Every structure is written in structure tokens, then in C-alpha cells.
Image (spheres, rainbow, N blue to C red):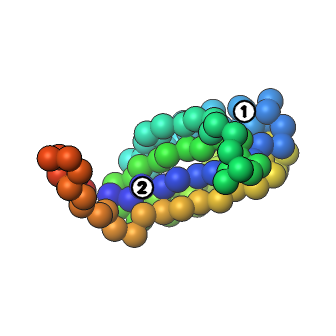
Amino acid sequence: MIDVIVLLTIKDTSSFRKYEKAALSRLPAHGGSLVAAFEPEPSADVTAVDEIHYLRFPDTRAYKNFRNDKTLSDLSDLRSMAISNTTIYTSRRQIPYQIAGHTHKAT
């Protein structure tokens, strides 16, 4: 399993919503899912991030196939109009933690 956190700075909201709809529709074809999407609370620590997506894929290959998806490549002009900056974090390994009597197991 691979978890992906995507920090997005949106340039044009209308274009972004069109791109986002198309991009998210391609997730299932690669075994991926949108776990959560949200607008962060304003903070001095987080500048110029308008939206955060948390994606999950069964493995690295599925994630790479999603990133190289032909449909997404065809939308590169729309993406350029919609998004000014993207920062992506991918999980390397899950870390099990014991928190107040609950064990978080690595998946």
C-alpha cells in the first residue's frame, strides 16, 4: 500500500474543478482512491496551499501508472491553467505506533 499526500496551490478555481473531476475519475482504473480532500485552516506554517488531497494506491506500480495515465497527460494544458504549484509526498513505509492503548498497525 502507498499513501500519497498532495498539496495544491490553485491558480484558477473553475479550471481546477474541471481538472480535478477528470483526474479523480481515473483513480479507480489504477486501484487508487481518494481518502480525503480538504482546504487547510490558514496557518503561518502552511503558505499558499489551497487544497490537500490524501490518495491511496495498492502499490507503487499502481501509483506510477496513475501518474502516467494518458487521459491525465491529455489534460496537461487544463492542469497548467488550474494549478500553480503541487507538492507530493509518498509513503516509503508504514510506521506502527502505540497510542493510549490502541496499536496502529502498519498496512
Give residue 11's position: percent from left, percent from top.
83, 43
Badge 1 or badge 2: first in the primary sequence: 2
Tell me if residue 78 comes above or below residue 21 in the rendering.
Answer: below
Q: Are marks 1 and 2 in contact (CB under 8 Å)?
A: no
Q: Is residue 24 left or right of residue 1?
A: right
The residue pinned by badge 1 equals 18
Residue 12 in picture, x, y percent from top left: 84, 37
From the top left corner, tell me how far across and down residue 16 is, in percent.
75, 37
Label 2 SS? strand
Residue at image coords 64%, 37%: 41
* Residue type highlighted by circle 2: Asp
In the picture of the structure, the residue carrying the numbered disc 2 is: 3
Q: Quadrant of residue 67?
A: bottom right
The type of residue carrying mark 1 is: Lys
Q: Which residue is depicted at the point 60% across and 44% down? A: 52
Q: Residue at x 32, y 58 (%)?
A: 1
User: Would residue 40 be found to the left or right of residue 13 on screen?
Assistant: left
Could you tell whether 57 is left or right of 13 in the image? left
**Residue 28 appears in the picture as rendered:** no
Give the residue at the far bottom of this rendering: 92
Dot in front, 1 or 2: 2
Q: Report the front residue among 77 and 92.
A: 92
- At horizontal 20% and vertical 47% (from top left) the residue drawn is 100
